[in-house]
Image (cartoon, helix red, strand yellow):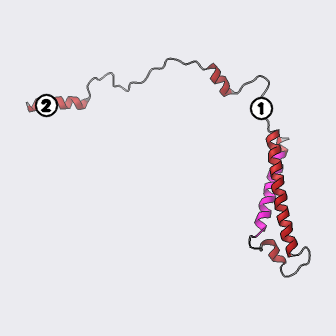
């Protein structure tokens, strides 16, 4: 069911993109090709049709998105928790050693040894 609704959403999106691209904000677009002759629908009827089609497709998109949210597969089975929830429940804190980066092995730094030797040489 979710796949069918997703396909319908995709089709409505494609139609909505096409309808919006055909329109022109200044009154041109598809209706400008019928400006010289009003044979089939007329200029005003074309813009009315495009506007109604845009609103209808936008409404259909809204309804289909709400339906898709309701029929989305949850993937949960009875009594089964997510992998993250299982890790949180089974986590036991352990004693971790803090790395010393070699600072505990050398009590004096090379810079302090250099200072000691230069001060002894000056005396």
Q: Is residue 41 left or right of residue 117?
A: right
Quarter of image, res 15: bottom right
Furthest residue toward right? 40
Q: Residues within 10 Å of mark 1 (few under 14, many from 20)?
A: few
Q: Which residue is mark 1?
A: 75
Residue 30 image offset from top left, x and y in percent? 81, 72
Residue at image position (81%, 45%) is 66
Q: Is residue 63 above or below residue 52?
A: above
CA gap between label 1 and label 2 equals: 74 Å
The furthest residue to the bottom? 36
Q: Identify the image quadrant of the N terminus.
A: top right
The furthest residue to the left: 123
In the picture, the disc for residue 52 is none
Q: Is residue 46 left or right of residue 79?
A: right
Q: Is residue 8 magenta?
A: yes
The residue under the point 35% across, 25% down is: 102
The boundaries of the magenta stretch are 5-24
Q: Position of residue 44 (x, y in %)?
A: 86, 73
Choose the circle earlier in sequence order: 1 or 2: 1
101 sits to left or right of 10: left
Residue at figure coordinates x 79%, y 57% from the top left: 14
Q: Name the residue at 83% across, 48% down.
A: 64
* Helix, strand or loop: magenta stretch: helix
Quarter of the figure with residue 57: bottom right
Q: What residue sits right under mark 2 in the picture?
A: 119
Name the one closer to the observer, 64 or 33: 64
Q: The residue tagged with tag 1: helix, strand or loop?
A: loop
């Amino acid at each position: 069911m979710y796949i069918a609704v997703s396909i319908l959403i995709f089709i409505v999106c494609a139609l909505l993109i096409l309808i919006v691209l055909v329109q022109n904000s200044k009154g041109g677009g598809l209706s400008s090709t019928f400006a010289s002759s009003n044979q089939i629908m007329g200029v005003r009827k074309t813009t009315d049709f495009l506007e109604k089609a845009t609103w209808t497709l936008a409404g259909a998109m809204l309804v289909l998105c709400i339906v898709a949210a309701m029929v989305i597969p949850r993937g949960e089975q009875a009594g089964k928790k997510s992998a993250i929830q299982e890790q949180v429940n089974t986590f036991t804190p352990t004693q971790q050693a803090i790395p010393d980066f070699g600072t505990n092995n050398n009590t004096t730094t090379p810079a302090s040894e250099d200072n000691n030797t230069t001060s002894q040489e000056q005396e």
